[in-house]
Image (cartoon, rainbow, N blue to C red):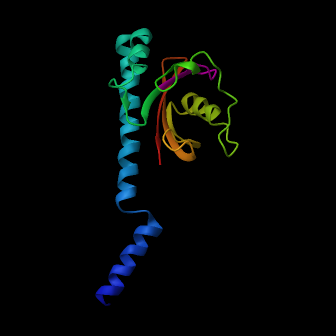
Amino acid sequence: MTAHLKKLLLVLSILVLGFGPNANAMEARTEAAKVMAIKAAEHIKLKGQKAAFAAFETKGGEYHDKALYVFVLNLSGSVVSHGADKNLIGKNLLNIKDTTGKEFVKEFVNTAKTKGVGWVDYVWPHPTTKNPAPKSSYILQVGKNLLVGVGAYK
C-alpha cells in the first residue's frame, strides 16, 4: 500500500468514524458536563438547596464554564434553578419541544425517575450562533423530587 493511499484511508476513517480533534473536543465537553452535574448534585446534598442554587446562578462562578451551566428542575418539569436564564425559574417546561419536536424535558424527568442518571440528546439554539445545534445533557436525580442537569453542545 502506498503512503498516499494510507493517508487517504486515514482521512476517510477520521471523517466516517468521527475520530480526530472534533471528536476529542466533544468528548471533553461531555465529560466536563457530567463532572459538573455530579459536583452540583453533591453541592445540593452538602450545602442545601438555597446555597447550591445561589452558587449555580452566579455568573462566572464555579458552576459556569463557557457554554456549560447547571439547571435544576423538579420532577414535575418546573425549573427551580437555572444558571443561564433566571427568568426560567418557576416555569414548567415539561411540554417544551426542541426544533425537531422532541419533548426533551419529559425525557429529562423520565431519565431521572427510571434510571436515576443518564444522557438526553436534543437540539437547542446555540448561545453564540443562535442556530439550532445538537446538545446532550447529563441528568441525575437528587433526593426525591429534583433533577440536576448540565448540557454540552456537540
Foreground residue, 80 or 145? 80
- Give residue 71's position: percent from left, percent from top: 49, 25
- Give residue 64's position: percent from left, percent from top: 38, 29
Q: Is residue 48 above or below residue 61?
A: above
- Give residue 54's position: percent from left, percent from top: 41, 14
Q: Residue at image x 53%, y 33%?
A: 115
| Quadrant including the N terminus | bottom left
Q: Quadrant of residue 76?
A: top right
Residue furthest to the front: 129
For residue 7: magenta? no
Q: Is residue 44 above or below residue 136?
A: above
Foreground residue, 62 or 74? 62
Residue furthest to the bottom: 1
Q: Residue at image x 55%, y 17%?
A: 145
Counting labels gives 0
For residue 76: magenta? yes
Foreground residue, 7 or 66? 66
- Give residue 30's position: percent from left, percent from top: 41, 43
Q: Residue at image x 43%, y 19%?
A: 57
Q: Is residue 144 above or below residue 25?
A: above
Residue range of the region highlighted in magenta in the rendering: 71-79
| Left or right: residue 16 compared with residue 8 | right
